[in-house]
Amino acid sequence: MMLLRVVCARQVLEATVVLLCVLYTSYHDPSWSAATYLYLLAPWALLAVSSLLVPDRRRATPDKPQLYRDADDGDWCFTLLPICLRNTSFARTSPVSAEFLVVTCAAAAVVKVSSRCGVKRGSALQNLTVEFAVTAGCAILLSLVNGPNAGSVATRALQGGAVTAAAALFLFFVHALPHVCAQSFTLGEVVVVSQCLVVALCSAATNFACRVGGHRGEAGGGACSFSDVAAFNQMLLLGAVCIVLLLTVFNPARNFRIFFAIVAAVGGFVVVPLLWVLLGRFPFLWLFEYIVSDKIKPALIAYWFAASVAAGAIAANFQQEIRGVTTAVRKYFHLCAIAIFLPGVCVDLQLTRLAAGIALFLFVGAECVRALCIPPVGEALRRSLDAFRDEKDGAVVLSHIHLLVGCALPLFLSDHQVAGLCTPELVSGLLAVGVGDTVASVGGSKLGRMRWPGTSKTVEGTTLAAVAQMTCVCVVAWVCRPGIALSEATRFAFPIVAVSLLEGFTEQIDNFVLPLMLYPMLKVLNANCLDA
């Protein structure tokens, strides 16, 4: 009973911090309306009612293994991406933007209710049918009542069909990811990953339709304003998704020929042809011309290569000396992420986005090779990466991918094209993951005495994380605006303290969810500072 009370206290504290962050963002963003609150908070109300009225009947059995990670579901994650994407080019131009993100929240709530009821033999199809029916109904209803400026009824019905198709793809990812990456995600994390995948694929489809239709590179943030770098990353993500799905179907464990055939088929018949159409030239030729287009890009790439080699060598030396992987060794990679991302954000934002997309593609490919033991390097990768597993890794090792995605997501979400530290939301991932999480973990393990209820995190670690992030923000503010008053820099105190507290309370993957929580708060603050 005491343990239950402690866990409930932690969840209450976590939910309180999240709600305060949402209210803070809405307070500083005048575009929020009553409908926005309704769309975002209605799924939370449904989840609360379901938690009280529907008993949790999820049980792992030999014929039905556990799919989700052993942690609370993280229901608050459902609305992270919808809040981050408000007032972005995707939200303004995509035909499935606002409605889709609202529908995914409702669909995720329905999935949560059906999962709590448990899936009996023969009822999985019934549950999926109910989930799709509710999702499609929400999509069509939202499209039909979208207001007088949304076009004719036929146009809105067509838009509802597009939203329904996107929502069906979302449901597919929500149900497929726990099987592909068993015990690697909670339900909330699965929902966020699925939202990200569908948003990226919808953007890729919109970009492809625009460019094939002859509307390449429209100015003014229109639907066809995606850059060549965005197109390149979109096709890489599409290729990665196709490869993972095909590998899941055929399961070529230790079979190099089948693995290579799948990768070659996706690359030769999907990624390269689509990129050739989008870029107007052979993709590798475009990549070479882009890299040599100025002197900064080759120098930055050389720095990244040297830094990556040095980081790998130092980490290997640490591992041998310590004879194991400690918290300090894991957080060392967070500092390496700062050293790699920060110069790119300051010097060349687009190249950094491109490099992050390519790195993500390579990381996913390397994990496929490791998980399937594909010769000749599969076994070596398994031994190397298994040493860095943490308690949140399941059937696959995703810690390094979470770190990369946490640092890169703010770059992908932002519409900014100009490099520089003076746009704080661009470095929200580096602040939350590179600085805050590292200082909290290392400082808490060395100096921590008082622990937050229901967790191993310490009050001292959280305090040190907030102080370190606030110090970085003050330094950056002084560099960007010499002579700035301290009171202006302290505007960022609430977002930083809130995210530091959330890092101490949450059981979710902090490398992934903390940047998504910090990003919208820094974005609205920066917009208000610029308006002022």
Image: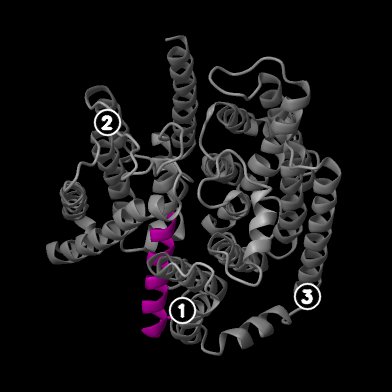
List the residue tagged with mark 1.
266
| Residue 111: x %, y % from top left | 28, 43
- Residue at 56% x, 67% y: name it: 365
Is the residue marked by circle 3 packed among few (<14), some (14-19), or many (20+) residues within 10 Å? Answer: some
Query: Can you tell which of label 1 and label 2 is closer to the viewer?
Result: 2
Question: Who is closer to the viewer here, 2 or 484?
Answer: 2
Q: Quadrant of residue 26?
A: top left
Q: Is residue 205 magenta?
A: yes
Q: Main secondary structure of the magenta part?
A: helix
- Disc with the residue nearer the chain's start (1 vs 2): 2
| Residue 370: x %, y % from top left | 59, 61
Magenta-highlighted residues? 196-215
Q: Is residue 373 above or below residue 56?
A: below
Is the residue marked by circle 1 packed among few (<14), some (14-19), or many (20+) residues within 10 Å? Answer: some
- Residue at 57% x, 44% y: name it: 515
Cα gap from disc 2 to disc 3, whole angstroms: 56 Å
**Which residue type does callout 1 highlight?**
Val
Is the residue marked by circle 2 packed among few (<14), some (14-19), or many (20+) residues within 10 Å? Answer: few
State which quarter of the image contains the C terminus: top right
Cα gap from disc 1 to disc 2, whole angstroms: 40 Å
| 98 relative to 439 in the view: left or right | left
Which residue occupies the extreme front position in the image? 62
Which residue occupies the extreme top position in the image? 2
Question: Who is closer to the viewer here, 445 or 277?
Answer: 445
List the residue tagged with mark 2.
57
Q: Is residue 417 visible?
A: no
Q: Is residue 415 above or below residue 35?
A: below
Which disc number belongs to residue 298? 3
Marks 2 & 3, CB-CB < 8 Å contact: no
**Which residue type does callout 2 highlight?**
Arg
